[in-house]
Amino acid sequence: MRELAVDGAWTQRQLDARLTRWGAPNPARYLTRAVMTVRPTARAHRWTRVTIVRPNAEARAALRTMRVRPQEIRSGELEHALGLAELRWRCGLPADRYCAQDTLGRDHRRAVARGAGGFGPAIADGVYQTTDGVVLCEYDHGYYTARQIRGKLTAFRSATRLNGQRVLGSVWGVPTARRASWLRDLGVRDVVVLDPETWLG
């Protein structure tokens, strides 16, 4: 539940992959399920029907005792959140060392309110903590423009420290090899292709 909480939602296929690798029983009593339609990429003409799983009320109560707050996914951000969850999974980033964007956004707003400047002009989608520093995580579903990509790259490169830790770099996830190539042409170095056919269906 802690792993699901940090992402906010998974597809049924994402849940099944995790349960298989962990050798864990299905936590059905802690889940709410809903069939939804999502786009594999931002520019896709076809929609895919998927079962989405989220923590239910019982799971949220258990998570509160662990002081874990499930990420809230705003309307219109489901596909992005699912892609980011897949990036975290493929890169092997555990929940206890990962900070999701809704938490980063709250920290940023608090820092700005205190006059500390926050995280600058571009907040990463997530941050992974290592023993040597932090890695910024991004998922581009296909909505980002070249200008937005360049803006994020500039912000990420100028961010040398985050919450007192050294910024080691960034890793980006994308749904297609074509999008990965485009990002590399814009200057993104570390890109992971996450074919939606392997985790959406």
Image (spheres, helix red, strand yellow):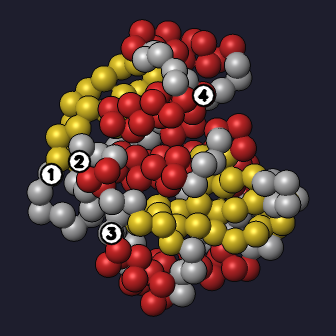
Residue shown at 50% from the left, 34% from the top: 21
In front of the other: label 3 or label 1?
3
Q: What kind of element bears circle 1?
A: loop
Spatial separation of the CA atoms under disc 4 and disc 2:
24 Å
Spatial separation of the CA atoms under disc 1 and disc 4:
29 Å
Image side of residue 200 versus residue 169, left or right: left
Q: Amino acid at mark 4?
A: Arg
Quadrant occupied by the N terminus = top right
Image coordinates of residue 179 in percent, x first then y, are 35, 76
Identify residue for label 1.
Answer: 47
Residue shown at 15% from the left, 51% from the top: 47
Q: Amino acid at mark 3?
A: Thr
Which labelled disc corresponds to residue 2? 4
Identify residue for label 3.
Answer: 176
Within the image, what quadrant is residue 64 found in? top right
Residue 141 at least partly seen: no
Q: What kind of element bears circle 2?
A: strand
Q: Which tag, 1 or 4, sits closer to the chain's start?
A: 4
Q: What kind of element bears circle 3?
A: loop
Which one is in front, 59 or 3? 3
Q: Amino acid at mark 2?
A: Val
In front of the other: label 4 or label 3?
3
Q: Amino acid at mark 1?
A: Trp
Identify residue for label 2.
Answer: 38
In front of the other: label 3 or label 2?
3
